[in-house]
Amino acid sequence: MLNRNAEALFWIGRYMERAENHARLIDVHYHLQAEDELGVEACGQDGECKEVPCKWTRIVDALGSRSAYEQQYGSYTEQDVLHYITLDRDNANSLVSCVSHARGNLRTLREKVPSELWDTINAFYLWLREKQPEDLMKESPHLFYGRIKEWAALFQGLCQSVMPRENEWHFIECGRFLERAENTLRIIKAVGNAAVGDGWNNAGAYPYLQAVLKSLSGHQSFRRYYADGMSVESIVEFVILNQSFPRSVHFSFHALDEHMKQIELSDNQLRTAHDRIIRQVAKVKADLACLEHDDMIVDRNRSIVGHLLEACQMLGHSFAKTFFRMGEASA
């Protein structure tokens, strides 16, 4: 497989997962609105935040885009933030940009992947392209971003159903699960920053962590494991360490490891670099295996999340150096 094809496939997986994550990230902040009294008091009737940080500041921070946003928009309002994250083509990580990038990569591979994938991603892009800023507020934003998640799930479901289990499939899945692990960690970090006092380890943090479960569609699954024993530590433990929940960090890294091992390479030098990445993934899996419930209790500064985020970023760089022509991989 040519390295440019591997790059395109990897980023198709990442961009489609990133688009869904943006919808989930916005969803978590809507879940928090009812609980975030500070955010309600800090926002005037026009929706503009009078105090920083507020809920709209935090959502931009979670995407690492505060300086770019403030340079373009200045103040924080609900409509501006939703437009920036969803429809702003000047934002390389907006929803429409992510879907456009994934569509562009898939267009170069149309002869190598099932036609259903192109039909779906093209329809998704054309639907989203026609949306206007006022459309985000006409209907419930919760319903609008729910539709985004449905489009992403349709694409992923088709990948599962029709793609041959060859290198092309495994590269898409590697991109998807690496992005998923990083995005789940970013949601935890964003909500942890929203909590007051000692962060996760105080009573005020509970509704924030419960919102994490709802945004990851994990509330019912969590109750199956912990019943009524809800606590901040249990929620963080579930989202990071649960072996069965498909959006947990543990599940994502184990899936990434399986797909990495299934990639078949003929070049000896490339196989050596490939083995090096597998060892990197194994180190992260070992770190996760060593974590226990008590570690969540003492992790007041969220250093575990920070460490795992750095590991995700290092793996992304390793993929670029190993499989892609340098200078072409784009985040």
Image (cartoon, rainbow, N blue to C red):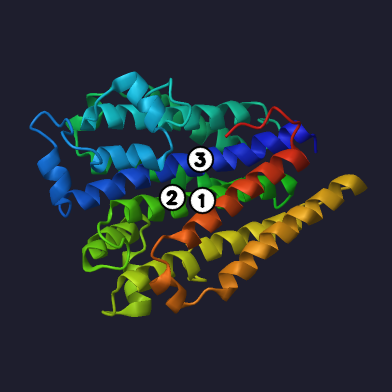
- Residue 121 position, x and y percent, is 50, 33
Single out the residue that lies furthest toward the right: 268
- Residue 261 position, x and y percent, is 75, 59
Query: Looking at the image, which residue is at 32% across and 24% down?
Result: 131
Query: Looking at the image, which residue is at 74% across and 50% down?
Result: 166
- Residue 182 position, x and y percent, is 51, 50
**Apparent side of residue 46 relative to residue 323 in the rendered image (left or right):** left
Query: Looking at the image, which residue is at 30% across and 73% down?
Result: 231
- Residue 47 position, x and y percent, is 15, 32
Q: Is residue 127 visible?
A: no
Q: Earlier in the sequence, mark 2 or mark 3?
A: 3
Q: Secondary structure at mark 3?
A: helix
Give, as a three-letter code, the residue at label 3. Met
- Would you place residue 298 above or below residue 126 in this image? below
Give, as a three-letter code, the residue at label 1. Glu
Residue identifier under label 3: 16
Give, as a three-letter code, the residue at label 2. Arg
Question: Badges 2 and 1: C-beta atoms under 8 Å apart?
Answer: yes
Query: Which of the two residues, 13 or 268, is positioned nearer the viewer here?
Result: 268
Residue identifier under label 1: 182
- Would you place residue 43 above or below residue 306 in this image? above
Compute the Cα span from label 2 to label 3.
Answer: 16 Å
Residue identifier under label 2: 186
Single out the residue that lies furthest toward the left: 45
**Apparent side of residue 244 relative to residue 323 in the rendered image (left or right):** left
| Foreground disc of the pair 2, 3 | 2
Query: Which of the two residues, 67 or 253, is positioned nearer the viewer here?
Result: 67
